[in-house]
Image: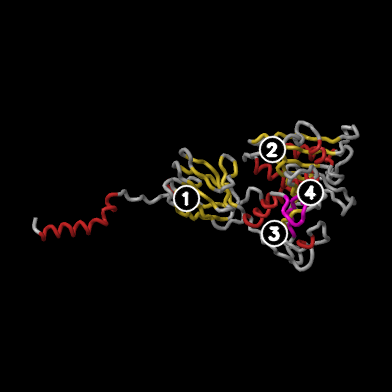
Amino acid sequence: MNRHLTALILTGLFVIAPLSGCFGEEEQKSIDPAGSLQIDFVNPEDAVLRAGEFHDFTLVGEGNSIATQPDVLIFINGTYVKSHMVVVEDNTVYGQLLTTPYTDEVSIAFMSSDGQTEALSVSITNGTPIVNGEEWFRKIDFITSTCTDTTKCGGYINRWMGAGNLAFERAAEYFKGHFEGLGYETHLLRVTDHGNLAQPESLNVIAWKQGRNDNCVQGMGGHMDIAPPGGPPGGGTYEGAYDNTAGTVAMMLYARAFADLTFECDTFLALWSSEEEGLRGSNAFANNNCDYCLPQDKELEFYINMDMMGMSWPAVKSNGDPFPYHAWSGPDADPEVQDVAITTVLDDVHFNILKAPRDLRIEGSYGAGCDQHWDDHYNLVMDVHEDTFGRSDHVTFRELGGTNHFPSRRI
């Protein structure tokens, strides 16, 4: 072979050598999230999420995954996914997405089984939250109004706990029917320490939902009795709209929202009575051994109390000042340190997920001090803190003792 031909061949080999990998390896395919992820049975770019409402999704392809931001919640088989991430282990995952009412943009991170990622922007618009103020108001109005047509006005007023109050008995049966209609195992718990069944000292509605784990229990509640007119400390009413038909209706709406969800622990949803007379109803539930009372052999993870619900951001008074909102957790053994884990949860939900204003204050005070932290939050609009103060039914559970009893009072 002559020298010129040899040189030409060698030159050609040097030139094409760097290109050999391009032809010798398979090209990496671009990912198509829409081929694996559907939201409400359409491609993600065509979906429109309604804030505060559930939306169905399907994710196919073993190894594919999605992740969402903190205010876009993922539910699989009715269970909240705390990690905000779902990976397909077999073939298809069926789930639901739920945004908060305050979510203004949605980004979903899609990752294919080979590690490629793509951020998907999903449209969002106003919706009707699963627990919303408009329905809450309508329900309160129905319960507290009277008229000749009981389908329009329930007239469940005069709910004073005492000797043989037929109006209270009628209201308790109505509330019990609400929980039963949603599928809860529901009971009426009567407290008759004096022995007269016709004159109960307390009559309570207790609804149970079985969890996956039989070793723990958690719950929510609010008192359904009202303070009699002229009664202490500030006088009562016939309707008790704010104290505490408001909390009672909140419990009814949460019960409906929870009906199709699955919880880790056995969960009770309760309407107490005789809160105004010394927490007799919640005490009877927590400290007796009836079949539907608080189990003595299970760990109580937390209790959340719904008393005097309704004033929150951004509601304002006539002078323009916002109404205060307080979320209290306890027991607070040391004012300098965080004592209970649920405080972190409350803080995250209020300020990171619901995006409430942090450290927003008014000029002046919201009233008299009530606990050891008062100097720090007397004028705070949105207030989340640990507390030793209490007069409502959360005190019953706080006083059970133990580091894992985490009551919270929300006003």
User: Number of labelled discs?
Assistant: 4
For marks 3 and 4, give the CA distance. 19 Å
| Mark number displayed over residue 244 | 4
Q: Secondary structure at mark 1?
A: strand
Residue 317 position within the rendered picture, expressed as x and y whole percent measured from the top left: 75, 63
Q: Secondary structure at mark 2?
A: strand
For marks 2 and 3, give the CA distance. 33 Å
Q: Examine the image and state in which quarter residue 9 appears.
A: bottom left
| Mark number displayed over residue 313 | 3
Residue 408 position within the rendered picture, expressed as x and y whole percent measured from the top left: 74, 49
The mark that comes first in sequence, 3 or 4, is 4
Q: Residues within 10 Å of mark 1 (few under 14, many from 20)?
A: many
Q: Amino acid at mark 2?
A: Cys
Single out the mark in the foreground, 2 or 4.
2
- Picture layout, residue 141 above or below residue 214: below
For marks 2 and 4, give the CA distance. 28 Å
